[in-house]
């Protein structure tokens, strides 16, 4: 008979790198299992997908990029910002090529609660992608019920989150404002919409692996009653140097030179510092980092995305002659670094991270211990997972949640220096390193044929296929 029609999954990623990068990896994973995939993007964001898709000859089933034309200066959005919600609702029922493509499921970011209604209109399942850990998915649910702003603690007093599998203590200062304050705001309203839409969705795709946080995977499914499939670490679908190098934006450093530099170093001898795609520190904070790197005597690659103080000059945070003094010892990357390529190099001995979930999981997958420096979003929770549950990291001592990092309490040179020493040498460091290496092996096993993430993805694709078959009867 005729070849059966391939299942077609459509992805609506939130248009920020921390969401677009794993969404593309998930699309690639689906494609590697003979699922047709389409990614929706907007003109400004499309190039970062195009770059990766075009040069992916290893993909079995091609990924289609659908660029929804975006009305200029629309809906009061700032210049240079394209919000996919308006683009999708404007184009969804009129856009020729996409309508003809007949999607069988929508994988939409958590920030798009409206996607549930879109899927309902098309009579197909909607899956949610949060881009975070089971641990945070559980903790945020518990927090919503616990309402920390109503408890008698002071802002800096640690309190424990009730009912979770481990005792986890946080302070109110480390929580996103929605859990810290009373009353309604745009973001609490959005979170309520997100929550309500999730209750009507088909299920949740989680970028994690069972062995990493099994107690929380179980809690999420059995106690909180969610349907979820864990299919990560999704970054591990990037195997070759080329695939790792082209993840995300164009790098601000020549990949081959960077690798050559790392090749000249001993195993586990270089610290990699990077704070994700959005964090910008103040000049004062950058200066403390620079001074601590010099004083610690460690070799390093330090990624700096710029500085949050308007109009600040580099001389204000980079000590005079710093790079000359550090020549051969340290590299400063101004802009985007090929993170996976760097983390996976055997010369890297530790990762100083803001604990974005992608970075955290990439650190785990590379088997490197971490210095945790959370700033905003759910990063303070990821820090707890790394330092207290997995025991593969040391906190730098960040105290305060801050959307822009400029509102954080300054982390002093001495604290950074101490964390660097503790993570790079000594008995505790060796123990953390060996635990991290074990987790790396588990991560790899989970995505190989028969592994837990591999099997969960198979189960998901099978369910979606049979949903589709039943619908078309
Ligand atoms: N990333 C990168 N180079 C950089 C900064 C970030 O490749 O210079 C990648 C990193 O590997 C990760 C993603 O961008 O996949 C950042 O996601 P994460 O969740 O860690 O943090 P966010 O950017 O969302 O705060």
Image: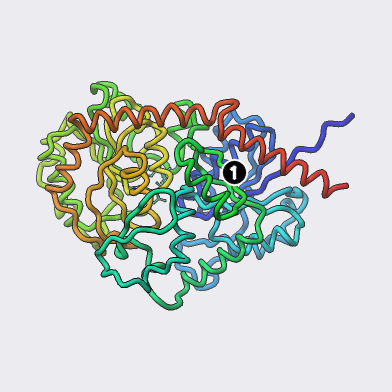
Between 321 and 416, the residue placed more toward the observer is 416
Answer with the quarter of the image where residue 326 lies.
top left
Classify residue 438 as left or right of residue 67.
Answer: left
Q: Residues within 10 Å of mark 1 (few under 14, many from 20)?
A: many
> How many numbered callouts?
1
Q: Is residue 346 above or below residue 44?
A: above
Q: Which residue is at a point 31% across and 44% down the rendered structure image?
A: 387
If the picture is divided into quarters, which one holds ligand 1? Answer: top left
Quadrant of the image for the N terminus?
A: top right
Between 203 and 59, the residue placed more toward the observer is 203
Q: Which residue is at a point 73% across and 49% down the rendered structure image?
A: 103
Mark 1 Cβ and ligand 1 under 8 Å apart: no
Between 425 and 315, the residue placed more toward the observer is 425
According to the image, label 1 marks what residue? 229
Answer with the quarter of the image where residue 175 lies.
bottom left
Classify residue 158 as left or right of residue 58.
Answer: left
Between 406 and 162, the residue placed more toward the observer is 162
């Amino acid at each position: 008979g005729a070849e059966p029609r391939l299942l077609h999954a459509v992805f609506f990623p939130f248009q920020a790198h921390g969401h677009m990068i794993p969404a593309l990896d998930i699309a690639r994973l689906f494609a590697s299992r003979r699922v047709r995939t389409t990614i929706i993007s907007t003109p400004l964001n499309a190039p970062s997908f195009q770059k990766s898709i075009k040069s992916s000859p290893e993909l079995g089933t091609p990924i289609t990029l659908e660029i929804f034309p975006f009305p200029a200066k629309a809906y009061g959005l700032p210049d240079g910002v394209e919000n996919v919600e308006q683009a999708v609702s404007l184009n969804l029922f009129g856009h020729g090529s996409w309508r003809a493509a007949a999607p069988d499921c929508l994988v939409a970011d958590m920030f798009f609660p409206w996607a549930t209604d879109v899927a309902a209109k098309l009579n197909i399942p909607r899956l949610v992608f949060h881009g975070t850990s089971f641990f945070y998915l559980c903790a945020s649910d518990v927090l919503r019920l616990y309402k920390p702003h109503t408890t008698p603690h002071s802002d800096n007093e640690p309190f424990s989150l009730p009912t979770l599998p481990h005792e986890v203590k946080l302070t109110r200062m480390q929580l996103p404002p929605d859990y810290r304050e009373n009353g309604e705001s745009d973001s609490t309203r959005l979170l309520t919409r997100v929550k309500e839409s999730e209750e009507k969705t088909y299920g949740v795709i989680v970028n994690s692996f069972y062995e990493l946080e099994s107690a929380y995977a179980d809690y999420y499914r059995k106690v909180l009653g969610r349907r979820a499939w864990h299919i990560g670490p999704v970054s591990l679908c990037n195997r070759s140097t080329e695939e790792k190098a082209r993840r995300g934006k164009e790098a601000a450093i020549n990949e081959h030179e960077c690798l050559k530099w790392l090749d000249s170093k001993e195993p586990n001898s270089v610290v990699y510092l990077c704070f994700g795609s959005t964090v910008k520190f103040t000049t004062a904070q950058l200066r403390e980092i620079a001074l601590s790197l010099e004083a610690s005597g460690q070799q390093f690659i330090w990624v700096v995305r710029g500085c949050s103080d308007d109009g600040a000059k580099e001389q204000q945070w980079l000590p005079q002659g710093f790079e000359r003094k550090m020549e051969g010892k340290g590299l400063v990357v101004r802009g985007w670094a090929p993170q996976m390529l760097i983390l996976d190099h055997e010369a890297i001995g530790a990762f100083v991270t803001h604990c974005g979930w992608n970075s955290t999981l990439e650190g785990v997958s590379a088997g490197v211990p971490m210095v945790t420096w959370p700033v905003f979003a759910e990063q303070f929770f990821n820090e707890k997972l790394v330092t207290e549950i997995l025991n593969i990291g040391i906190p730098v001592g960040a105290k305060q949640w801050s959307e822009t990092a400029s509102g954080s309490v300054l982390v002093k040179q001495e604290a950074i220096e101490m964390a660097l020493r503790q993570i790079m040498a000594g008995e505790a460091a060796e123990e953390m390193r060996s635990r991290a290496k074990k987790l790396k092996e588990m991560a790899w096993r989970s995505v190989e044929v028969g592994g837990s993430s591999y099997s969960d993805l198979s189960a998901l694709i099978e369910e979606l296929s049979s949903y589709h078959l039943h619908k078309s009867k």
